[in-house]
Amino acid sequence: NKICIKFTARESHIMAENKKIGKYDFIEYFDDANVYKVSVNNIYKLINADGEVLLEAEYISDPILICNKYFQVVFKDSNWKYGLAYVNGYVIVKPKYDYMKYFGRSRYHVTVGGNIGIVTATGEELISPK
């Protein structure tokens, strides 16, 4: 697919084969992961080149490359809880943490009620935040 992004003073569009895929307030393309992070009215989505929604959330981090193979994102749901997903939309960890951030070596720093924990890229809690 031939993809282009058109920007005007009021709106941004993603176009594929001269067909408008969507109108967004914000568009960011991640070449390595081959996904777009877009937003409309402060709701974020990861979409593919065909405009298919892969993941929708209140917040989505930039894709993180894990083990040179998989791209993951931290996302936040409407209850302000954080979870973990692959960029294809498959949820690894359902939103349950008060905070979640990647800190390296395929591990994430998480908190629940002020307690700190560590979660792996596969969702295993190495240190439970309880």
Image (spheres, helix red, strand yellow):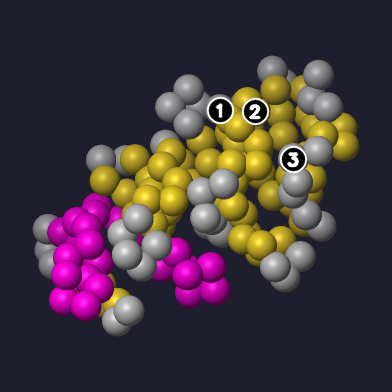
Quarter holding the C terminus? top right
Does residue 121 lie above or below 123 as drawn? below
Residue 87, image x and y in percent?
Answer: 54, 56
Give the structural element (helix, strand or loop) at label 2: strand
Residue 103, image x and y in percent?
Answer: 74, 51
Does residue 125 lie above or below 35 as drawn? above
Mark 1 to mark 2: distance in Å?
5 Å
> Is 86 on the left or on the right of 15, as rendered?
right
Amino acid type indicated by mark 2: Tyr
What is the span of residues highlighted in magenta in the rendered image? 11-35
> Is 75 on the left or on the right of 41, as rendered?
right
Please name the residue that numbered disc 2 is placed on: 97
Residue 75, image x and y in percent?
Answer: 53, 41
Tell me which residue sits at (32%, 49%) in the image.
Answer: 39
Give the quarter of the image for residue 17. Answer: bottom left
Tell me which residue sits at (74%, 40%) in the image.
Answer: 123
Q: Is residue 31 magenta?
A: yes
Give the structural element (helix, strand or loop) at label 1: loop
> Is 92 on the left or on the right of 119, as rendered?
left
Is there a contact, CB below 8 Å, between mark 1 and mark 2? yes
The image's mark for residue 14 is none
- The local crowd at label 1, few if under 14, some if 14 to 19, many if 20 or more residues have their Cα within 10 Å, is some
Please name the residue that numbered disc 3 is placed on: 123
Amino acid type indicated by mark 1: Lys
Quarter holding the N terminus? bottom left
Camera-near label (2 vs 3) is 3
SS majority, magenta: strand
